[in-house]
Image (tube, rainbow, N blue to C red):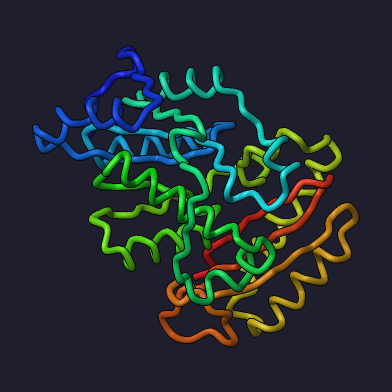
Amino acid sequence: MSNKNSFEPLEIVKTKESLHQHLQSYRNDRLRIAFVPTMGGLHQGHIALINHAKTLADMVVCSIFVNPTQFNDPRDLEKYPRPIEKDTNMLAQAGCDVLFKPEVEEMYGQDEQWHINLGHLDNVLEGLHRPGHFQGVTQIVKKLFDAVQPDIACFGQKDFQQFKVVEQLVIQLQLPITLEMCPTVREPDGLAMSSRNVRLSENGRKQALALYQTLLQTKAGLHRKSIRTLRDDAINMLENNPGIRLEYFAIHDTESFTEADSLVKNQQLVALVAAWVDGIRLIDNMLLT
């Protein structure tokens, strides 16, 4: 829907007030606003989100904000890539309308408290292995939603559990926002695109492909083996793979996000994996049905 061509300049705003003023004219004209929140280190997966957002709305806002409250490890926060010039150029070429690039002080006051009941989502897989992570995610997503007030927000499937968490936030707080989950974008060899991939060595890059290959193997075996056997086979394959330290491999129902025991008719399943390669934590998933 967005009529913007890639030659129009990208508007860069750094405060909530200037963002509100800039977007007000679009709201007055009842134009639809789509939003793509990112932490920067952009790659073609992010650009796919921008492109999809452009088909859904009249204008697209992208945010770049490395959110300190969702990092469990301060070293991970420190090492997170911040190639802002490259990111800005990529957004301009993709025809994004507005880049919202606030400083930490703009988004957080002193001693802020935040907690939302995410139920079991906070205690399984990513929630279990990264305590507090999803509280940090929901805190900043709510702040960004308040700042942008979008009609639609686009998120990548690669962070499947995060999408379920944001969905929970929207339902609980009854936010008038439609969520769109966009398919994971992969490198030609199948590795899921991630801002962290640039930190992999050449050898680590090859070893990391085992995550994708295991997901493919699981999907291929869905109607031939039990869910338990598929899970055990995947865990064995990854644990016996040199250079990979497995954190979890699980098969969940996509709606309830509870672990699946057997395949029920019309049930949608997703296989999810997290592992360490080269000291870098990678996640991936694949819809099985």
Q: Relative to 285, say whether 233 is above or below.
A: below
Where residue 180 appears, as percent x and y from the top left, is: 36, 52
| Quarter of the rendering containing residue 13 | top left
Give the percent coordinates (x, y) of residue 78. 71, 36
Quarter of the figure with residue 196: top right
Q: Residue at x 48, y 86 (%)?
A: 264
Closer-to-camera residue (233/163): 163
Q: In this rendering, would 219 be left or right of 13?
A: right
Along the viewing direction, whichever of 266 and 168 lies nearer the viewer: 168
Q: Quadrant of the N terminus?
A: top left
Q: In the figure, is residue 271 to the left or right of 175?
A: right
Give 262 or 162, whichever is nearer the viewer.
162
Tell me where residue 147 appears, x and y as whole percent: 32, 40
Closer-to-camera residue (67/233): 67
Image height check: is 76 above or below 167?
A: above
Left-right relation of 62 to 30: right
Q: Quadrant of residue 83?
A: top right
Which residue is drawn at the image coordinates 29% and 29% (left, top)?
A: 17
Q: Position of residue 129 (x, y in %)?
A: 69, 64
